[in-house]
Amino acid sequence: AQSVTQLGSHVSVSEGALVLLRCNYSSSVPPYLFWYVQYPNQGLQLLLKYTTGATLVKGINGFEAEFKKSETSFHLTKPSAHMSDAAEYFCAVSDRWGGADGLTFGKGTHLIIQP
Amino acid sequence: ETGVTQSPTHLIKTRGQQVTLRCSSQSGHNTVSWYQQALGQGPQFIFQYYREEENGRGNFPPRFSGLQFPNYSSELNVNALELDDSALYLCASSLRRENSPLHFGNGTRLTVT
């Protein structure tokens, strides 16, 4: 069975500071990994995904994540936070594309941007 | 390109009642998945439909059922509503091929009293 752990239900950073959101996963097979963002009263928007190949993945809005198999991690980073980044962020894992078993999501991290 | 749309946006039901939530997939998408997101939690996979048949299911009881129609629109039906069914229900559509991401709708907020 797969699982996702997101460390820190709330993360607060100053505008312009580095954003680091942590995600660790467990999977019995090489995983597909995702980061989604959710703004209030909206659905989820895909930020980036890891399937195979390059372990450093770049996404939208300046975010990137690095797949580290030895650490079973897929942490999300952004060099400089912007006020518009304030939202809920979810890490998710799937053991096969197509998702017939669905994505397994973490509980989410609420990102707060201090002016 | 039309995105994923869900209706209604909000719904209040009484315990024991039945509810139907609707989803219109993004144009051209042939696969639809439903997720339940309780307050303060991540989404949980309910089931997935492809070619009008359920082809994957999460840990949800049979009173959660669905339909997918030939135009790829979809319904989620929940019978015998319980208080714990109060949640945001998200529909996501995709193509059944490698690297086709899920496109989520804005969800239906269901409150069971």
Image (cartoon, grey):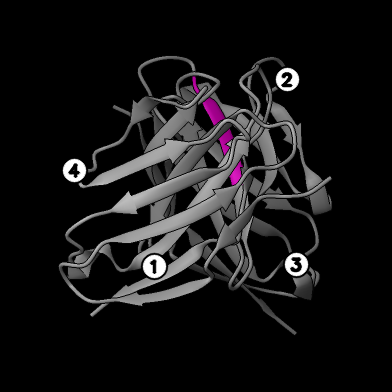
Q: Is residue A107 visible?
A: no
In this rendering, the answer to whether B37 lies above or below A64 is below
**Hey, which quadrant is residue A4 in on the image?**
top left
Task: Determine whether, in the image, residue B75 is placed left or right of residue A41.
Answer: left
For the point 17% across and 65% down, which residue is it? B82
Quarter of the image for the N terminus of chain B: give it: top right
**Per the image, is B47 magenta?**
no
Look at label 4 and name its amino acid.
Pro
Residue that badge 4 annotates: B61
Q: What is the magenta segment's predominant secondary structure? A: strand
Look at label 1 and name its amino acid.
Gly
Q: Residue furthest front?
A: B70
Residue that badge 1 annotates: B40
Q: Earlier in the sequence, mark 3 or mark 2?
A: 3
**Magenta segment range?**
A31-35
Asked if the residues shown at circle 3 and circle 4 are in contact, with their CB atoms under 8 angstroms apart, the answer is no
Chain letter of the residue carrying label 2: A
Q: Same chain for labels 3 and 4? Say yes or no.
A: no
Instruction: Indicate which label's residue lies in the foreground, 4 or 1.
Output: 4
Residue that badge 2 annotates: A54
Label 3: how many Cα within 10 Å (few below 14, some 14–19, many 20+): some
Element class at badge 1 = loop
Q: CA distance from mark 2 to mark 4?
A: 39 Å
For the point 50% across and 24% down, which residue is it? B50
Residue that badge 3 annotates: A17
